[in-house]
Amino acid sequence: MFNKTFLQITIAALCVGLLLPPERARAQSTDMIFENSATAMSGEATARDFYVFDFPSKKYPVTKTGKKAAVSSKTGSLLYTPTAALRQQTVASYAERTKATNPALSKAVSQAFAPGKADYSSVYQNIAGSFGLKANDAGDAVVANLILSYLIVNNLQGNRPVNVTQVSGVQAQFKPKLQSSAKLTAPGMAAQTGEEMKLQFVIQQAGWQSAIKSNRLAAFQQNVWQATKNNYAIDMRQVRLGVNGFERK
C-alpha cells in the first residue's frame, strides 16, 4: 500500500542534512533522524489522548490495560477543512512537542516541512487517496496510520500489499468508534488530530524506507510495534488484515 517513491520527502531530507553543521551532519544523518521518529511516537499518544481503543469484538486481541472508554450512541463528524495555516501550525506543534526529547527530529521536521518545502498533506494524499482515504477526514488518517504500522511490523513490502477492500474493512471497524468520541468530535479537534496523524504518517513512512535502505529495519519494526501497542493497545504481530479489518491470526 505505502511503498510509492517519496521524491518530495527525500529531497527535503537531503536539504536538512545539508543545512546541519558539518559535525552534526557526520554524527547523525537526516535518514537516521526520521528512523528515530518511531521512538518519538511512543510519547506522542495523539490518538490515545482522545479515546481508548477497543476492538468491536472479543475475537480481536486488545491490550488489557487502562480504563476502556464507553461508546456513545451519538456520533459526530470527523470531516474538516485543511488549510495552509493549519498545516504550518501542525508542523510547529509537532516540532515543539518533540524538542525536549528529540531535538534533532524537531529541527528536521521544522525544516523539511517549512513553507515552500515538502507538503506533507500532498504526500499523504498521493498514497492514501488511491485507497479511498480522504485528506479531510480525521478517521481516515487514523486508519492510514494503523495500516502503515501493520505493514511495517509485518514487513509487507512490494506492490500494493493491501487492497481497497481491506482498507474499507478497517474504516468500518474503527470509524464508528472514533465518531462516537466526544473529545475527538469537539470543535477543532478533528482538524488538529487529522493533520497531526497525516504528518506522523509521512514521517513514519520516510523512516521505514530509510530503515530498509540502511539495513536497520529490525530496530525500526520493533519501535513501531511498541509504539502501536502503547498508543492504540493493538499488537500488530498478533493480527492479520482481512476484508473485515484486523482479525486475530
Image: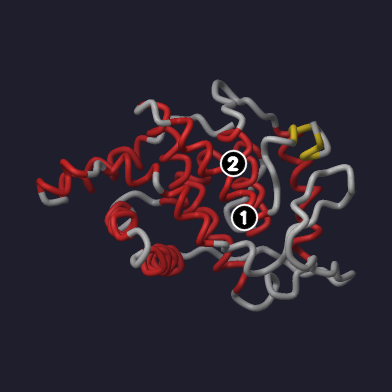
Mark 1–mark 2 Cα distance, whole angstroms, equals 12 Å
| Crowd band around label 2 with a 10 angstrom C-alpha radius: few (<14), some (14–19), many (20+) | many
Q: Position of residue 112 (x, y in %)?
A: 30, 52
Looking at the image, tell me whether mark 1 or mark 2 is earlier in sequence order.
Answer: 2
Image quadrant containing the N terminus:
top right
- Residue shown at 62% from the left, 56% from the top: 231
Q: Nearer the viewer, residue 7 or 211?
A: 211
Three-letter residue code for mark 1: Asn
Percent x, y of residue 183: 69, 74
Badge 2 amino acid: Ser
Q: Secondary structure at mark 2?
A: helix
Q: Nearer the viewer, residue 8 or 27?
A: 27
Horizontal arrangement in the rendering, residue 23 relative to residue 35 (left or right): left
Q: Which residue is mark 2?
A: 149
- Residue lying at the far top in this picture: please name it: 158
Residue that mark 1 sits on: 230
**Total numbered labels placed on residues in the image:** 2
Report the colour scheme: secondary structure
- Give me the residue at 28% from left, 58% from top: 107
Q: Quadrant of residue 238?
A: top right
